[in-house]
Every structure is written in structure tokens, then in C-alpha cells.
Amino acid sequence: MRRALRVVGEESSPDPDDDLDVAGVLAAVAGGDLHAFGRIYDDLAPLVFGVARRVVRDPSRAEEVTQEVFTEVWRQAARFDAARGSVRTWVLTIAHRRAVDAVRSSEASRVREEHVARREPVEVAGPEEAVVTASEHDGVRRCLEALTPLQSQAVRLAYYQGFTYPEVAEMLGRPLSTVKTRMRDGLIRLRDCLEARDGA
């Protein structure tokens, strides 16, 4: 069902007259017609992306919102009521709601993180703690060096620099599934290495 997002720009918006038969196409989508769904997607994806981009700002997040919107369109097509407006209006309303939800979720997450950070006590390490911490960092560094280059890069980007898996995949130029597999294998090897060092 997922189709590659082709963002041409908002100036490529469909002609309003084209909406006359879109309701019929959406009815076919409600019946499980993937070809009809493709037509709806191709017609409205640039508009949906434009709405999402204006609200969430971040292009990558806007693409995610766009995919979420069309997933909802696929699932809820049978609930569309032509008496309440056009298909385009219905889809763009879903897009706006999804984008606002994404912003609220992101903001709530940021607030939670700040709240937790304020509550966590700040401990000043003494000489003994500093030596232990340095030793732990050295152990992690050595275990990271034992990973394959791809495993090491993926783990460093995700867990030390805070990038998401899709971002890591894009940065490394590898498929997301490959990055997830290498990340999992790398973390297992890293855990085993650290446990072996602790037991030594």
C-alpha cells in the first residue's frame, strides 16, 4: 500500500474540477481497490505534504505524517460522507489533524525530558568515581572498536549522537532493515564484550 512520496511542490496542486469523480474513486478504495488508492495518493500527496510541512516544519516528519494520513484514508475510506464536503477537504482535514498531533506529541516529549532532567540530582564525581568512569568509557570504546565498521557507526550515531534509525540509515546510505539488523547484532556483541570485561 505504501507508495514513494513524490513531492513536486504546492504549485502542482490538482485542478479543483478533478474532484468531481474523486468520490467515486474513494468508493473503490473503500472496496479495497489498490489502483484507485494509487490515484488518490498521486492526486493528493503533494497537497497533504504541503499541509504537514507548514505545521511540523521538518520535511522528514512531514513525510511520515503524509504516510500516516494515507494509511488512515485507506482504512477509513468507507466512512467518507460526500454530503459533508469534498474528498480533498476530508483528506486535508485528516492531514491537518495528524500534523497537529505530531507537533503536540513532540512538544510533550520535550517537556517530559526537561522535567526529568530538572528532577535528576546533579552529582559531582570524586577522584574515585572519575577513575571508574574513565575505565568504563575506555571499556565501551574498546568494545565498540571490536564491532564491524557498520555496526560501530550505527551504534555511535543512534546511541551517542541521538539519531533515529531512519536517519542513521540515510546517513550511512543503507536500507533501514539492514541498519536495524546490524544495530541489533552490534548491541548484542557490545553487551557480551562488556560483560566479559566486567567478569575478567
Image (cartoon, helix red, strand yellow):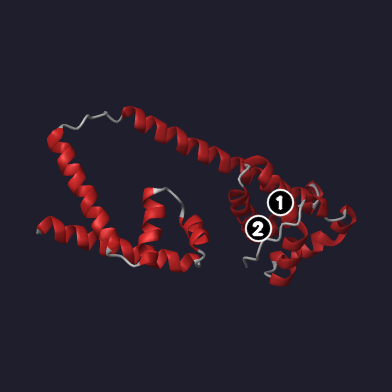
Identify the amino acid type marked 1.
Answer: Val
Callout 2 touching callout 1 (CB < 8 Å) = yes
Residue 191: percent from the left, percent from the top?
24, 59
Identify the amino acid type marked 2.
Answer: Phe
Which residue corresponds to mark 2? 70
Residue 164: percent from the left, percent from the top?
46, 53
Q: Secondary structure at mark 2?
A: helix
Q: Nearer the viewer, residue 128 or 182?
A: 128
Which residue corresponds to mark 1? 48
> 13 above or below 1?
above
Going 69% across and 71% down the picture, which residue do you hit? 34
Going 32% across and 64% down the picture, which residue do you hit? 186
Q: Secondary structure at mark 1?
A: helix
Residue 2: percent from the left, percent from the top?
62, 65
Residue 99: percent from the left, percent from the top?
62, 44
State the CA–CA distance, disc 2 to disc 1: 9 Å
Q: Quick one: label 2, few (<14), some, or many (20+) residues within 10 Å?
A: many
> 104 above or below 40?
above
Which quadrant holds the C terminus? bottom left
